Image (tube, rainbow, N blue to C red):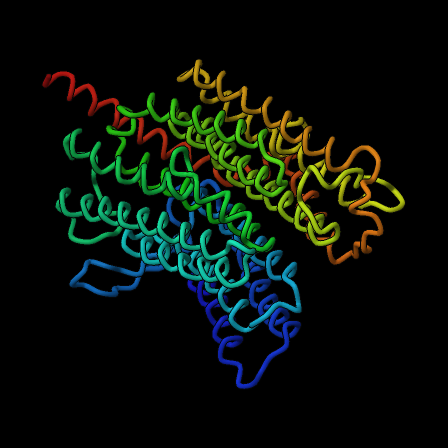
Amino acid sequence: MLSALILLPLLGAALIGFWPADISGKLARTIGLVFASIAFLWTVFLTIQFNPGDINQQFAESVPWIDVLGLNYNLGIDGLSLPLLVLNGLLTCIAIYTSDESLQRPKFYYSLILLLSAGVTGAFLAQDLLLFFLFYELELIPLYLLIAIWGGEKRGYAATKFLMYTAVSGILILASFLGMVWLSGGSNFALASLNCATLPLATQLLLLTGILIGFGIKIPLVPFHTWLPDAHVEASTPISVLLAGVLLKLGTYGLLRFGMNLLPEAWSYLAPWLATWAVVSVLYGASCAIAQTDMKKMVAYSSIGHMGYVLLAVAAATPLSVLGAVMQMISHGLISALLFLLVGVVYKKAGSRDLDVIQGLLNPERGLPVIGSLMVMGVMASAGIPGMLGFISEFIIFRGSFAVFPLQTILSMLGTGLTAVYFLILMNRAFFGRLSAQVTNLPRVYWSDRIPAMILAVLIVVFGVQPNWLARLSEPTVTTMVTIQNVVATVDLDKAKGKS
């Protein structure tokens, strides 16, 4: 049942890649969209069948694979992974749909997108440390090639930088995973059989450091963030949608699943430092966004700040804050995908993303009024305006984190105000005022350009008005994770203090 989510995009990639003759971009896109849509609808079906009250892994699959390595094919879904799977399916469909029919080498392009989707899906489903790592690395090469081949002028530099950073991330994560299993005396890499809570605090801290840096690069957190703005600026719009909407969530998912959940004593010990790290990322990302004149780079830096909220929530490790972290991952995925889509339309029609060049795009006759209106909604959602998903996810994070880290929470709340500042700069300079001479006679915007953004906008509003539809899927799972984590951490820290 779960294997189908991985096999469907792999079959689609194989069908397109091994098509016996030359294939048009339109046909390749249609085939890719069919397979991606079936996979997405399958995640929706699983969501309907999912029992939120069951905190165990559901629809589980387990097949022995390589006994000598202790590697088994273990898959499962819980309230943490399910929303991310649905998000991945939706954004993969949108990325394929919004891709240019006339792009070069369409067989290779759509095969890579489907392969990327399969890797991300497998990582969210994996219930085995080594299996997770294999899927985590699987998405590296497709994304590298998608940036290096179909990116902008400096695509080679951006793709190589991404590859180097992510390679270091993978090495650190693998080393930590191996240490967890070997040092705890485990016979395999299955999550269900792993018990790292018995390890000494010093050993847990060493392992957790590797996990924090490894997944911190992927999120990304300051100072490991420098690859992200370059990758976004050079990547095409559909790839930026996937990068911001889904791939960054592998980092935050990893912190929750393998950091907080497996190393509770070390996590509690480092929690104040993690909360401070979150504040630095939030304020730094927002400050850099204010200084940008490239619309796409501004949205890219905003991602750094908004992912810092997730680290704050996970550091606090209260049931409410961790629920907010899961909702923030979904919120950021939808909102950032919307913003990158709209910036892509602006660039496609106006030929520039420079705030010093474009102006007055909300002009109702010669500008982009519908795109501008959607952009207003998108920046309002990102700035945390009530009635939208961005507000409720950030509110839950701040409410859940304040009791544990009041100072860090207040400082992080400043990031919300700074978000309003830099997006107000973007709207004022690019969309309001008189239409600039450089962007007159703009091409017509067709419904095919508007529909994906409108779907995301509707979801942002619907989940903002009815957040319980999303929260109910994850609340029992995260509550159980946090309760077990806090009990184990408290007991172990008390023991450590007694020994000292």
Left or right of residue 177, residue 200 in this image: left
The answer to whether residue 47 is visible is no
Image x and y of residue 336, in percent = 59, 42
| Residue furthest to the right | 365
Image x and y of residue 356, in percent = 69, 37
Instruction: Point out the image quarter for the C terminus.
Output: top left
Q: Nearer the viewer, residue 101 or 358?
A: 358
Q: Nearer the viewer, residue 406 or 383?
A: 383
Image x and y of residue 258, in percent = 31, 41
The answer to whether residue 346 is visible is yes
Tally of numbered tags:
0
Residue shown at the point (60%, 79%) measured from the top left? 23
Q: Nearer the viewer, residue 211 or 471?
A: 211
Left or right of residue 436, residue 489 in this image: left
Image x and y of residue 464, in percent = 64, 34
Residue shown at the point (61%, 66%) measured from the top left? 33
Residue 202, quarter of the rendered image: top left
Question: Is 80 located above or below residue 72 in the figure?
Answer: above
Residue 401, quarter of the rendered image: top left
Instruction: Point out the image quarter for the N terminus.
Output: bottom left
Residue shown at the point (56%, 67%) measured from the top left? 35
| Residue furthest to the left | 499
